[in-house]
Image (cartoon, rainbow, N blue to C red):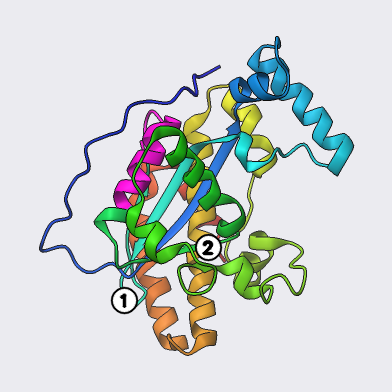
Amino acid sequence: MPSARLAPQLTSPARPETAPRTAYLILDTESIPDGELLAAVKFPGKSPEEAIELAKAEAVAANGTDFLPVAFQLPVAACVLRVSPDFQLQSLALLDAQEFRPAVIAAKFWQGMRIYPEAKLVTFNGRRFNLPLLELAAFRGGFAAKEYMATRRHRYGGSIDLFDWLSNFGAVKLHGGLDLLAKMLGKPGKMQFDGSQVWPLYREGRLAEINQYCLCDTLDTYFVFLRTRVMTGDLTREGETIAIRAARQMLERRRGDYPMLGQYLDTWK
């Protein structure tokens, strides 16, 4: 099984002065249980693998799901899309591509927050999971997140959580989640993987596939975001069509880089 141990903080790169402005950062993450922490806190004397299995069984008995609290999770995938002020997709990045080390993923994310302090974060259920996951990784690794803590962490206006926004901040249940909303728009949504398969895939060493799955979820989040901006009046339907067409052209050029991206494009209606 691949190691999930944390790695040293990295040196932060500078943003080129000539780089076009980025207004939004679309984020999604995937995570695995932290067996060492579970063994230390809840199951002393057990191996990390045994601690994870015991914790999952305990969670199923209590909640009907084996998904563990965010405090006992480590990031093994983080995808970030940069989006311009006119909602055009500028770039996509899988953080710590090739190695996918939890601490390096977290370090790169918080470096990005410093490089793009003016960009607004966009997530789906990020306030409940993605951002706490990366905040706790910053706590663990001692990574600075000054601008984020000062300006983006408050519930209303600091970032855009599309799950919060579309559920009227928890007033209604949004059954089906991102998969439902993506498919409403004719986008692929979930294909062969879902979040429950991340841990088994990780144990098999299939980190690249986990990260490509994360990429597809991040793209779905971007397209759902576009439609919500049509609803707010910040984007016209024509502007949405232009942004989608440009995104598709960019993704077609990257098709060969990620096998799952090819499947995503082929499934796109």
Return the residue at label 1. 85
Where does the image place residue 155, in percent across and percent down from the top left? 54, 68
SS state under label 1? loop
Q: Residues within 10 Å of mark 2 (few under 14, many from 20)?
A: many
Kind of residue at badge 1? Pro
Q: Residues within 10 Å of mark 1 (few under 14, many from 20)?
A: few
Name the residue located 37 percent from the left edge and 31 percent from the top edge: 98
Return the residue at label 2. 221
Asked whether, in this view, residue 266 is left or right of residue 247, the answer is right
Q: Residue furthest right?
A: 61
Which comes sooner in the sequence, label 1 or label 2?
1
Which span of residues is magenta-colored? 96-112
Where does the image place residue 182, in percent across and percent down from the top left? 61, 65
User: Which image quarter is the C terminus in?
Assistant: bottom right
Name the residue located 53 percent from the left edge and 73 percent from the top edge: 156
SS state under label 2? helix
Q: Image quadrant of residue 184?
A: bottom right
**Is 58 covered by the magenta stretch?**
no
The residues tagged by marks 1 and 2 sit, at their Cα atoms, a distance apart of: 17 Å
User: Which image quarter is the N terminus in?
Assistant: top right
Where does the image place residue 59, in percent across and percent down from the top left? 80, 36
Pick the residue in front: 262 or 182: 182
